[in-house]
């Protein structure tokens, strides 16, 4: 079972470049999320999508955009990368049905901005 | 607002030692509580969960009990192994919202 698949796994960018991080899930989940993980900060929510066609800002949305392309795919775009966006990015998905549903995570994209 | 506080690490133990990682939370209402584990170079995996007061979640020898009176969800294991070395995250979820994570606790177990 693939679960949540993220591409690429690693990426190095120069300041000002743009790129899109891809995420796809095969569990038929309605909700999808993007987090960033920084040392000593835990995981912080960037954006989430409660269902196809909807997206909402999380705790740290500045500098990012998202697209819920269909039920399976949720992409994260950096329009003009900055060194402060160097981080590990995780995509997650979950069932609906209230707070007792866990989230399932991909293996992450390790992004360095020079 | 909702938040999670967990003990700072790193926690360094010898194999077969007893493990406790403290986690307390602040939340309105009745959140669900989770422990996730992250092995080096990997994503987060659900370790266990509890969805109401006095529930005990358990998996792979790890346990945690949802204590509403102390707003705590401490992770315990009776005898750790080298393979348990990882980063452990406590998290809560309230309603259909995203998870709120603690900052993570690094566990290092030596043989």
Image (cartoon, coloured by chain):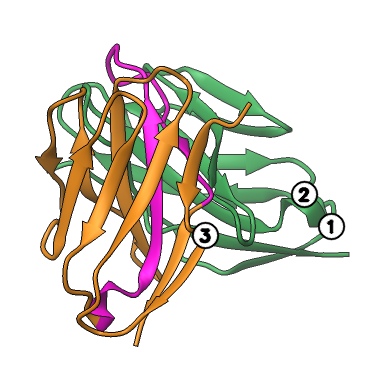
Q: CA distance from mark 3 to mark 1?
A: 33 Å
Q: Nearer the viewer, residue B79 or A57?
A: A57
Quarter placement of the N terminus of chain A: top right
Q: CA distance from mark 3 to mark 2?
A: 31 Å
Q: Is residue B79 above or below residue B30?
A: below
Residue at horizontal 20 percent and vertical 41 percent from the top = A67
Q: Is residue B91 above or below residue A59?
A: above
Residue at horizontal 15 percent and vertical 47 percent from the top = A58
- Residue B45 % position (x, y): 56, 40
Span highlighted in magenta in the image: A83-107
Residue A76 can be seen, yes or no: yes
- Residue B82 % position (x, y): 81, 57
Q: Colour of chain B?
A: green
> Does residue A102 belong to the magenta stretch?
yes
**Label 3 CA crowd tier, 10 Å (few <14, some 14–19, many 20+):** some
Residue B80 - label: 2
**Residue ID for mark 3:** A9
Looking at the image, which residue sits at the far top?
A: A97
Q: Colour of chain A?
A: orange
Q: Are the residues under marks 3 and 2 on the same chain?
A: no
Q: Secondary structure at mark 1?
A: loop
Image check: B21 left or right of A59?
Answer: right
Q: Is residue B75 above or below residue B84?
A: above
Is the Cβ of the residue at disc 2 closer than 8 Å to that at disc 1? yes
Image check: A59 left or right of B17?
Answer: left
- Residue A104 % position (x, y): 47, 33
Q: Secondary structure at mark 3?
A: loop
Residue at horizontal 41 percent and vertical 17 percent from the top = A28
């Amino acid at each position: 079972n693939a679960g949540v698949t993220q591409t690429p796994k690693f990426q190095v960018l120069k300041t000002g470049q743009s790129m899109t991080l891809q995420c796809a899930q095969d569990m038929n989940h309605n909700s999808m999320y993007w987090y960033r993980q920084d040392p000593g900060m835990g995981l912080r929510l960037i954006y989430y999508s409660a269902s196809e066609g909807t997206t909402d800002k999380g705790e740290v949305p500045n500098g990012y955009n998202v697209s819920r392309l269909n039920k399976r795919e949720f992409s994260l775009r950096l329009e003009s990368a900055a060194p402060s966006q160097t981080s590990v990015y995780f995509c997650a998905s979950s069932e609906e049905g209230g707070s007792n549903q866990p989230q399932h995570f991909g293996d992450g994209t390790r992004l360095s901005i020079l | 607002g909702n938040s999670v506080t967990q003990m700072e690490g790193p926690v360094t133990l010898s194999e077969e030692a007893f493990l406790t990682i403290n986690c307390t939370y602040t939340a309105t209402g009745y959140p669900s509580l989770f422990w996730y584990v992250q092995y080096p170079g990997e994503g987060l995996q659900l370790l266990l969960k509890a969805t109401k007061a006095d529930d005990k979640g358990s998996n792979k020898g790890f346990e945690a009990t949802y204590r509403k009176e102390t707003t705590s969800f401490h992770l315990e294991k009776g005898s750790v192994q080298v393979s348990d070395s990882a980063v452990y995250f406590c998290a809560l979820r309230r309603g259909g919202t995203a998870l709120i994570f603690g900052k993570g606790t690094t566990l290092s177990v030596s043989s």
